[in-house]
């Protein structure tokens, strides 16, 4: 018993530390699942993972208390339903770890207005919401840096759009080390999963699956079968191929790509042959795709429903995550305070 505990602790120590934040916005769709979540799930086995719901960050858009709480709960439930395991990874809510806010304050003292203003995501926000350019938006990168280095993470699984934030995180971490002449914070690197990530197209023609592209573009893990059938049947197609082995236009390629993640190889080959012989009927293909999507999402939907009504389990998961994340964060903050020169009298 003691021996196996020793093994567990020593492997845990040598595992790389991974941190990633999840924005508490809306429901998870197939694009999120195949584009990121599947990799969180596989990483939780080999790494010391901290995955958190970024509710501090979401305050930049001033949600009502009711919406904020509901969104955090929904996201937590959907990630659990999709396979994040609170026994393997530390799953927590950002605001449950106020040490993050303290580190954010320290980092802000050495973050320069100029570099924050040059950040692409800040410039985008100024354009999108000129009526609400608050200091939280400006300092989004220092909060994100605090999220990451509070656990001294080295790997951060994020999409391409977050690379500049990661670069700034390294800058802030190195600046802290230099200022205090310590070798304290490691340099975190973005981790992009290589080839294992598939791009999931939306149903409305071009572009990737997302919520902002309009109703009907995304299939959500929580969607009811009727909704899935309706959206898939409305997917954009064309009048069909006229010469054998004709190249597929983007909308048709998208249907095949969607089929390749939820349907059997036989089904994909069957419709591919029909396409190449100019005998394809898109209605049949969509029917098959819809049924396969329903088969794929049904276990998720059922688990989401179950979890949403299991308040006791949700609060147990949140409490467990909070405890583990705070233990790690409190250690860092105590050391950082000492490095800075805050000593108790
Ligand atoms: N900025 C990230 C996004 O928009 C979310 C996020 C916040 C995050 N803090 C983080 C991601 C820390 C990784 C690590 O998706």
Image (cartoon, rainbow, N blue to C red):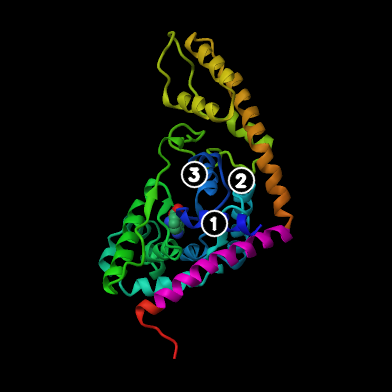
Residue sitting at x 46%, y 25%: 253
The N terminus lies in which quarter of the figure? bottom right
Where is residue 144 shown, x and y percent of the image?
A: 41, 62
**Dominant secondary structure of the magenta stretch?**
helix
Among the 4 quarters of the image, the one containing residue 290: top right
Q: CA distance from mark 2 to mark 1?
A: 17 Å
* Residue stretch rendered in magenta on the structure: 311-337
Residue at point 27%, 64% (across, down): 115
Q: Per the image, is 323 magenta? A: yes
Residue 329's x, y, as percent?
49, 68
Mark nearest the camera among 1 and 3 is: 3
- Tell me: is circle 3 under 8 Å from ligand 1: no
> Of discs 2 and 1, which sits in the foreground?
2
Which circle's residue, 1 or 3, is located before the other in the chain?
Answer: 1
* 238 horizontally vs 64: left or right: left
Q: Is residue 16 above or below residue 203?
A: below
The location of residue 209, given as percent across then percent down, is 49, 39
Q: Nearer the viewer, residue 178 or 201?
A: 178
- Mark number, residue 130: none
For the residues marked 1 and 3, what is the alpha-carbon distance in whole angstroms? 15 Å
User: What residue lies at 47% left-to-right and 63% top-to-bottom?
Assistant: 57
Q: Secondary structure at mark 3?
A: helix
Q: Is mark 2 within 8 Å of ligand 1?
A: no
> Dots 2 and 3: beta carbons under 8 Å?
no
Can you tell which quarter of the image residue 165 is in? bottom left
From the image, tell me which residue sits under label 3: 36
How much space separates mark 2 and mark 3, taking CA atoms? 12 Å
Element under disc 2: loop
Graded by Cα atoms within 10 Å as few (under 14), some (14 to 19) or many (20 or more), the crowding at tag 3 reads many
Residue located beneath label 1 in the image = 24
- The answer to whether 158 appears left or right of 234 in the picture is left
The residue nearer to you, when weighing 287 against 162, is 162
């Amino acid at each position: 018993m003691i021996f196996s505990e020793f093994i567990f602790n020593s492997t845990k120590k040598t595992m790389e530390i991974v941190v990633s934040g999840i924005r508490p916005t809306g429901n998870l769709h197939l694009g999120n699942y195949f584009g990121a979540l599947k990799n969180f799930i596989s990483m939780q086995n080999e790494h010391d993972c901290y995955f958190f719901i970024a509710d501090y960050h979401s305050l930049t858009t001033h949600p009502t208390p009711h919406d904020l709480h509901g969104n955090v709960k929904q996201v937590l439930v959907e990630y659990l339903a999709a396979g994040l395991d609170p026994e393997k990874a530390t799953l927590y809510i950002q605001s449950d770890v106020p040490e993050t806010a303290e580190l954010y304050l320290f980092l802000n003292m050495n973050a320069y207005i100029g570099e924050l203003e040059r950040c692409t995501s800040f410039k985008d926000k100024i354009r999108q919401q000129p009526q609400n350019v608050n200091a939280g938006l400006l300092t989004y990168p220092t909060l994100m840096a605090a999220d990451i280095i509070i656990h001294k993470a080295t790997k951060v699984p994020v999409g391409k759009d977050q690379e500049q934030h990661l670069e700034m995180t390294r800058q802030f971490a190195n600046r802290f080390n230099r200022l205090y002449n310590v070798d304290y914070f490691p340099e975190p690197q973005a981790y992009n999963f290589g080839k294992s990530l598939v791009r999931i197209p939306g149903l409305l023609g071009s572009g990737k699956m997302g919520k902002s592209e309009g109703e009907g573009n995304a299939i959500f893990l929580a969607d009811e079968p009727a909704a899935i059938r309706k959206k898939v049947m409305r997917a954009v197609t064309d009048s069909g191929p006229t010469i054998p082995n004709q190249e597929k236009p983007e909308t048709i390629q998208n249907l095949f790509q969607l089929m390749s993640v939820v349907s059997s190889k036989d089904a994909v080959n069957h419709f591919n042959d029909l396409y190449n012989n100019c005998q394809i009927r898109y209605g049949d293909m969509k029917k098959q795709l819809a049924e396969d999507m329903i088969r794929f999402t049904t276990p998720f939907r059922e688990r989401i429903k179950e979890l949403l009504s299991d308040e006791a389990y949700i609060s147990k998961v949140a409490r467990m995550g909070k405890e583990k994340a705070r233990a790690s964060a409190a250690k860092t903050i105590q050391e950082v305070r000492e490095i800075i020169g805050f000593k108790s009298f």
